Image (cartoon, rainbow, N blue to C red):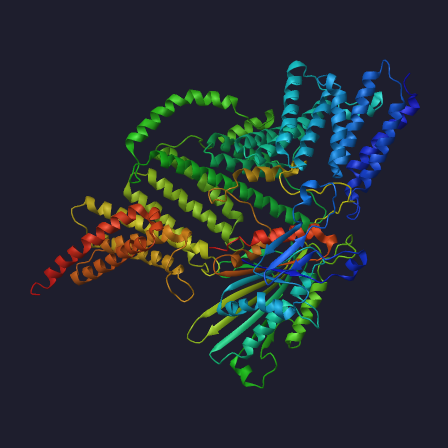
Amino acid sequence: AAAANGGWAAVCEKFRTARTLSTVESRKDPETEPYRSKYSARALLQEVKQLLSAAEEGDEARLLAVRRAVLEYELGVNHTDTEELSAGEEHLQRCTQLLEPHRLSPDCVSLYIQAQNNLGILWSLRDEIKTAQTYLESAEALYNQYMKEDGNPPLDPSEHFMAEEEKITDQERSKRFEKAYTHTLYYLAQVYQHLDMIEKAAQYCHTTLKRQLEYCGYHPVEWALNAATLSQYYLSKQCFMEARHCLAAASVIFSQAGQVPSAEDNEMEQDQQDLRQRKAEIARCWIKYCLNLLQSARKLLEDNIGELDPDRQLELKAQRKKEEDEKEKGRKKAVLFGTSDICDSVLAMEEKVSSVYPLDFQEAREIFLVGQNYVLEAKEFFQVDGYVTDHIEIVQDHSALFKVLAFFEEDYERRCKMHKRRLDMLESIYVDLNPQYYLLISRQLQFELADTYYEMMDLKIAIGNRLEELDSHTIKKINSLAQLAIKYYELFLDSLRNPDRVFPEQLEEDVLRPAMVAKFHIARLYGKLITSDSKKQLENMQTSLEYYTFLVDYCEKYPDAVRAVETELELSKEMVGLLPTRMERLRAKLCPFI
Amino acid sequence: LQVALRIRPMSAAELAEGAKPIAHRMDEQVVVLRDPTEDPDDILRASHSREKSYIFDVAFDSTATQETVYRATTRGLVAGVISGYNATVFTYGPTGCGKTYTMLGTDGEPGICTRTLGELFQAIEDASGDTEYEVSMSYLEIYNEMIRDLLNPSLGCLQLREDAGGTVQVAGITEISAISAEEVSQRAPMGCGGVWQTPLPDAARPPQVMQLLAQGNRQRTQEPTAANRTSSRSHAVLQVTVRQWHRGGGLRRGRLFMIDLAGSERAAQTQNRGQRMKEGAHINRSLLALGNCIKALSHRPSTKYINYRDSKLTRLLKDSLGGNSHTVMIAHISPASTAFEESRSTLAYAHRAKSIRTTV
């Protein structure tokens, strides 16, 4: 016979109190007694266990077993939380044993899965990740099997200690069940990460995010940031479709975070400030997306001198046509975010920018413009005054966007205009920067400025070469660009000097290549300076020779450096051989009588 | 990165508990820690030595004076700061192991902050006519990512701002300066030879500055639950800037950060019923940690992808930790057997820190 109704209600009450102690009261426990509530809860659970074992078996054997299993589960979690892993494991194992024959039925499946989740956590606390993996994967398989074979919303474990009229709705049951499974996937994501199975970890993170939207409740700002961060992972794997999807969802969900009502004005302002910052951070992720997409396209399209290869372009365009069908299929299989209401908004966001490699200027320009808009958005918050480092990184990204767009531009004059934009934006932030405090950024800017002047000079020469003769205006321009490039390369090299202004004997690994390239470019630049004064020309050649020689000598002294500058070294060796002869000839022309 | 280790003397409380010393300084650089846990069933470990030794750049125990510690760790940084370089000194370790003693010290036994400022003031006094110095300092606390001016706590929470000319600054913080000026040094020396330009009404001499620091330290956030622990979760940052004008040369500016880090001990002490929680590959229950999981997916730091904002402390120190900068960490432990776990994790951490290179 079953326990008297009054008695059963008391048992349920005890059980609920224990749960409240464990989950709610325990948060208020003092630091000196952090498990006080949990120990109290444990005592109560033990009492309930006693009461149950006093009940008779018989027709209700199954029901009794399940109730016992619930208690074993709660005790298992309790012991795990108080760092008593052996006891925790014992209880959880007993729980699954009791449920084993009925684990696929609606009254047991949810509890079984949760028990396995906790066994997974327990084993991870023992640093036995592989064992944790087996439990969690088993839970995953069970869920899938249950959904396939049955699929009805199963009982929530707490219902076994509820009166009939308190039982919860099917909708709520489903929600809680799905939440348990979401945790299974989330724990698996962490396991895979610890096992260095990064791709799988990312996949599970992605699914967890998706399920948070559908089942778990989420905080819009936090969710958006997580999605944006995940997009950065996808970028690192060149998975642009997935990256775009994450970013689009991030933007849509973020916009759900409206005004945060708050009691004090001060707090409100801080929250608004945070919101603006988060929005700007998401904008920066978008910038990286556009930039990466353009740069990856460039890598595919460039030939061995860094120009756009028209044959490869045709090849890729043809290939793309073929792949369009496959892409559609792929898209249907992909893990998409979105309950129906946000699905459309996400799609709309995605349609604003491509996720396939741009193969010509038009396509590149569209992506560029999207990136540029996000630059402006990000700079609204990350202003120079207050966020120097962030602001500069955004400007550097903007410059990089122009640089990669220039690759797609055929017309040299228009390319020059793009580089000019870069120079303007980089110089304006460089000029105010204190190099002592921003050493690394200063160097980056110096180098990029030098490179850009160098590039522009080369373009002007190429443009000039198309004409019959270089006019004096063009010559002045070329020389001025060359001088400015030299200036910035020299500034960069100067920054490497030690406090006594001595250039280091041996260069550190991270500055080796840039330093060598700087020397090499300076050598070349002196060779490009145009002058009608032969004496001056001789001087320039001498300087050029000195710099080429530096490279050759350095690599002889430090053979390890050769790897870093192979191409430049080869050319330098050639020039070191050729220049003296040329100089002799020039000298002979100047002083024919010596 | 230079790492020093300081073992404090056993405290009265520890002796009363019956704790035995298990941490010893073997020589100038080596510290040995013995595992005091008795476990007769642990056959595996019985034959292994229970002692582990750690090597640091310099090690101190209770025989070392404040002066010794100062000379070995911080004194060498002062010349650099005057010449225009940056430097940082950290104290690290669990609460109650002597971080504040090392940093601030007591009236009778002043610590690093006092001695450093003393040395800098001396430099001003000794300055020749061609060189002008300004030494300025501010004292702040970072607690729960909030910044407070310890010299003027009523200002409330302050913001960090980066500016192009200087570095990361705390907007609105109190700065106390001393300038050496020709006219002043020609007058009868005042003791510090400086002119104070501050909100304070009277000329502040070095002893008064020390008083300010002590007072500021008392303003650090106390937590009501940690009854016998003071300021266990706040970082105190003393920021000293030295500006030097040399006639014929330019302006040089060096910054020295002296930081008393928050206690590194774990929040909850268990009732000693089971095994200890290990750091490492354990699963985090809460979905709130999903962000961390995702961030770790692309763990290669690269400018191709976004890294989110660092904590306030690392932002403040960022420009001082790069390039031409010296950093010294002074880790602290208790020698008592009752503090074995904490000591072990502090030693391991400090030991690992030695392999950090502060490159550009």
Q: Quadrant of the N terminus of chain B?
A: bottom right
Q: Nearer the viewer, residue B56 or A486?
A: B56
Image-based side of A275 in relation to A25, left or right: left
Taking A320 as reference, is B283 above or below it? below
Compared across the picture, whether B42 is left or right of A421 comes to right
Report x, y in % for residue A70.
Answer: 79, 26
Q: Nearer the viewer, residue A102 or B251?
A: A102
Q: Is residue A204 visible?
A: yes
The picture places residue B76, in percent across and down from the top left corner, at: 54, 68
In the picture, measured across the screen, residue B317 lies left or right of residue A502, that is right
- Residue extending furthest toward the front: B47
Residue drawn 78% across the image and 30% down it: A74
Q: Quadrant of residue A415?
A: top left
Between B84 and A323, the residue placed more toward the observer is B84
Give the x, y percent position of residue A392. 47, 51
Residue reaching furthest left?
A593
Q: Nearer the viewer, residue B50 or A42?
A: B50
Quadrant of the rendered image containing residue B294:
top right
Residue at x-position 65% and y-position 49%:
B49
